[in-house]
Image (cartoon, rainbow, N blue to C red):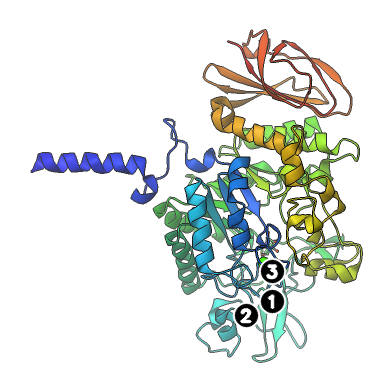
Amino acid sequence: MFRNLVIWAMVLMTFCFAVPFACGQAKIVDAEGHQWWQHAVFYEIYPRSFADSNNDGIGDLKGITSKMDYLKDLGVDAIWMTPCYPSPQIDFGYDVSDYENIDPMYGTLKDFDRLEADGQKRGIQIIMDFVMNHSSDQHQWFIDSRSSRTSTHRNWYVWHDGKGPGQPPNNWQSTFGHSAWTLDPKTNQYYYHYFYPEQPDLNWRNPAVEKAMFDVTRWWYDRGVAGFRLDAVDTLFEDPDLRDNPILPGKNKFGDPNMEDKYNVKLPEVHEVLRDLRKVADQHNAVLIGETWTKDVSELKQYYGEHSNELQMPMDFLFTTVNKVSAPEFRRQIAAVDSAGGWPVYVLSNHDIVRSYNRYGDGQHNDAIAKLMAGLYLSLRGTPIMYYGEEIGMENNDPKRKEDVKDPIGKIGWPQEKGRDGERTPMQWTSDANAGFTQGTPWLPVPPSYKTHNVANEQQDPNSILQFYRHLLALRHQNRALLDGDYVPLNENDPDVLSYLRRYKDQSVLVVLNMSSQARTIDLDLASKGINSKKAQTLLTTMGNEGKERTLPQMSLEPFSVYIGELSK
Ligand code: NOJ
Ligand code: CA
């Protein structure tokens, strides 16, 4: 009897190692205990803009599913979809009116299941966006909440009396402009919204809210999602005493006084919620990615949690604040992130940030710089999150006139703030009309660059940005040093060339990035790292006439070039 039990236990353990998602264990991918998301390449999709299957001008889930082979071939392991739940679309999905469904404009739950299944077939995980700070004002919870002061859901949102006639409870401002309080005449109280008035903040001090929201995550885990990107985590809690925020000198882009969000952002209670959310995630082998804006890297530690029990993947946005190609600046950021103690998560851009092609491009070498930036963040220790279209060199297409703006902040803040339409334009698939995104009228116009920068053309061109991404991602997936090796900076005083090793046991991969518009010849200081290699085997480079081997330590580099090579032992 005992022997049978032992045999059964062994069978079960073997099965669980092979099928870890089914057995409630983390999906470990190697002997050193790395989890699947540490070796994965994530890709953010803005569903409205990826692929339109029914030609209504708006991207949809069937469209995404139809591009699954493209994503697989590119080297993507997980897609994060920005919200596609039912929504009045005031903030294009970040105003959710039902957390457990799909907006008809994007499809149905059946379409979602198909997308999920098609992803699974190719080893692509699906990550949903969890808009946890606020719902839409059209959510049933808020409709009930505002109906009377004694309604069941009244305390699910943040309601207060004004300070006096016509005066909100305090001076807090919405990050989307003007007061964060809106008076609701029906019950003559103000409700709080850190974002648009149509996005009332949920009251996370109410346990019923926490339970309902945690159940939402369980519901999607049961449907097969592999994790969540947590929206606006810093804004979950507000000071119960409603103290006024300190006013700072000057005005912001909405014409409001500058303010330190001292009493309504980053309250410590956030971390209790993150820890509890992580417990639920762990029961489902899921990964939590955070929208974690920090002033410096040391702050990121808090989101990993003291015992690594909060977010596995708090995003490091600091690259997005470096708006020029600068070796010293990137060197500084990488060193800080790499030593912060957690697994780094690198981001160049997203649906809220001007595209990297524009931020780093100098107008003359834009394509070379796009490859250079890929060479940088896709060769570092950590998990990258790409933004759709980055791999083909998509650029911003900002509205030229106020009347063309779709994103409300562009209307409120025009002309200083043009909104985020520019970085959300349709994916450029072909050089046909509307970049092959739709046969209807696209919800946002494609930039003229679609004629040259599109998937079809770039698939034919061996020197395209797309081909560089494909090769780099393929290399990254199979090279142990690039996956797990330590980051070892080289030549740390060079003002133009960023170089480093990725070192795993006795294997070393050399990465050299010329961040200047001039050709450069450098002497790599490998000796101080105990390396005597006289040769590197070229793995990938943007320098056309490159042989298979390079002699070290001297190295000549073309302007804005990338060299990646394996050092001979
Ligand atoms: C962050 C999202 O990325 C942004 O697009 C949205 O407007 C706000 N959170 C509010 O949900
Ligand atoms: Ca559509």
**Amino acid type of the residue that numbered disc 1 sits on in the rendered structure:** Glu
**Amino acid type of the residue that numbered disc 3 sits on in the rendered structure:** Tyr
- Name the one closer to the observer, 322 or 296: 322
In the image, farthest residue toward the left: 1
**Amino acid type of the residue that numbered disc 2 sits on in the rendered structure:** Gln
Q: Which residue is mark 1?
A: 198
Q: Which residue is mark 3?
A: 194
- Name the one closer to the observer, 306 or 417: 417
**How far across and down, in percent of the image, does residue 204 sit?**
54, 69
Q: Are marks 1 and 2 in contact (CB under 8 Å)?
A: yes
Label 1 element class: loop
- Find ligand 1 in the image and state its quadrant: bottom right
Instruction: In the rendered structure, find residue 138 and report the number of the disc placed on it.
Output: 2
**How far across and down, in percent of the image, does residue 168 sit?**
73, 80
**How far across and down, in percent of the image, does residue 341 sit?**
56, 37
Label 3 element class: loop
The C terminus appears in which quarter of the rendering?
A: top right
Circle 1 crowding by C-alpha within 10 Å: few under 14, some 14–19, many from 20: some
Q: Nearer the viewer, mark 2 or mark 3?
A: 2
The N terminus appears in which quarter of the rendering?
A: top left
